[in-house]
């Protein structure tokens, strides 16, 4: 293809294609902001959660230090549902997870789980009392510890160490891949095995809500599929409520019941995951199509 022909190719998808086809971050932010249009219809957020929210955020203003990142942010997801947050870099996606778990400064608004106010609980109380677990991005395992010891660390808030050991055995039964490597140091695991260990360690405290930050980051495609199959089983098989940030927007929306598009710390779009996948504007900006 000649240079002139290349120049006529349409600019497409955030983060997709070669350098000549990538929309700049500034363009993505500007065009994504336009997606908000006339706003989200009243009652739409509640309807997506079947009007029975298990996790709800109302008018949240949150950030780091004195900097406000989220502005009057709202969220609702029902028990056993999954929600995926997408949007350009710097939109505030991870800040939503951080705020739910207690890693940010809250300037206003509320966070409830099961109808109980948890806005200002500490992370350890979110895990122990409210049943919320945070699965960090890659490299959160303890590399010099064995797989088994990493799992035990997941129960550090349990009253008795034997409880963590008992739960670890249940996890080994569920995931034979980890059981085969229980005595190996975590640093020798593959990327997919490390992600499985990170997810499994979060399960030791038997949480009801999983906050999952970029589950596919740094993984080969075969391991990405494996991780999403595990998350699907946790949602549909064990009834976990999952709130996820995923840069691979296509994979995240294919997985999730609900999709939110964030722009500049505000909610620009909210719809069923499948519906956002079919939205041409979302596709052009985030799905490479």
Image (cartoon, rainbow, N blue to C red):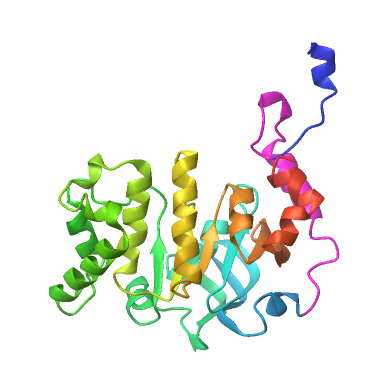
Measuring from the top left, give residue 133's x and y in whole percent: 39, 69
Q: Tally the marks.
A: 0
Residue 72 picture quarter: bottom right
In the image shown, does 139 or 265 lie closer to the viewer?
139
Of residue 13 and residue 240, the one placed in the foreground of this image is: 240
In the rendered image, the residue lying farthest to the bottom is: 115
From the top left corner, tell me how far across and down residue 182 is, in percent.
Answer: 19, 53
Looking at the rendering, which quadrant does residue 134 occupy? bottom left
- The image quadrant that residue 154 belongs to is bottom left
Which residue does the image show at 70% across and 60% down from the upper left? Answer: 274
Seen from this angle, which residue lies furthest top?
2
Find the magenta span and give its range: 14-42
Residue 87 falls within the magenta-colored stretch? no
On the rendered structure, is 227 left or right of 3?
left
Q: Quadrant of the C terminus?
A: top right
Q: Residue 189, position in %: x, y?
A: 28, 43
Residue 35 part of the magenta segment:
yes
Q: In x, y percent, where is residue 253? A: 63, 56
Q: Residue at x 30, y 62 (%)?
A: 201
| Residue at (34, 78) in percent of width and height | 125
Q: Does residue 204 appear in this view? A: yes
Q: Residue at x 19, y 57 (%)?
A: 148
């Amino acid at each position: 293809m000649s240079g002139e022909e290349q120049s006529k190719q349409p600019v497409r998808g955030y983060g997709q294609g070669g350098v000549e086809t990538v929309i700049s971050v500034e363009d993505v932010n500007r065009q994504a902001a336009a997606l908000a249009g006339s706003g989200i219809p009243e009652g739409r957020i509640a309807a997506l959660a079947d009007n029975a929210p298990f996790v709800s955020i109302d008018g949240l203003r949150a950030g780091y230090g004195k900097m406000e990142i989220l502005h009057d942010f709202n969220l609702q997801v029902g028990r056993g549902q999954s929600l995926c947050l997408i949007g350009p870099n710097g939109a505030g996606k991870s800040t939503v997870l951080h705020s739910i778990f207690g890693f940010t400064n809250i300037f206003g608004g509320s966070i409830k789980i099961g109808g109980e106010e948890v806005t200002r609980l500490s992370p350890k109380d979110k895990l122990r009392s409210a049943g919320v677990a945070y699965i960090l991005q890659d490299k959160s395992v303890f590399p010099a510890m064995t797989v088994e010891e990493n799992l035990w660390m997941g129960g550090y808030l349990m009253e008795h160490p034997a409880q963590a050991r008992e739960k670890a055995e249940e996890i080994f039964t569920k995931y034979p891949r980890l059981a085969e490597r229980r005595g190996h140091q975590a640093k020798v695991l593959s990327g997919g095995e490390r992600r499985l260990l990170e997810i499994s360690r979060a399960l030791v405290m038997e949480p009801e809500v999983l906050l999952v930050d970029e589950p596919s980051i740094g993984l080969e495609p075969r391991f990405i599929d494996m991780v999403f199959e595990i998350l699907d089983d946790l949602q549909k098989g064990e009834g976990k409520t999952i709130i996820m940030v995923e840069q691979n927007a296509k994979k995240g929306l294919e997985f999730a019941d609900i999709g939110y598009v964030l722009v500049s710390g505000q909610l620009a779009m909210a719809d069923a995951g499948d519906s956002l996948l079919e939205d041409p504007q979302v596709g052009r900006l985030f799905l490479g199509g």
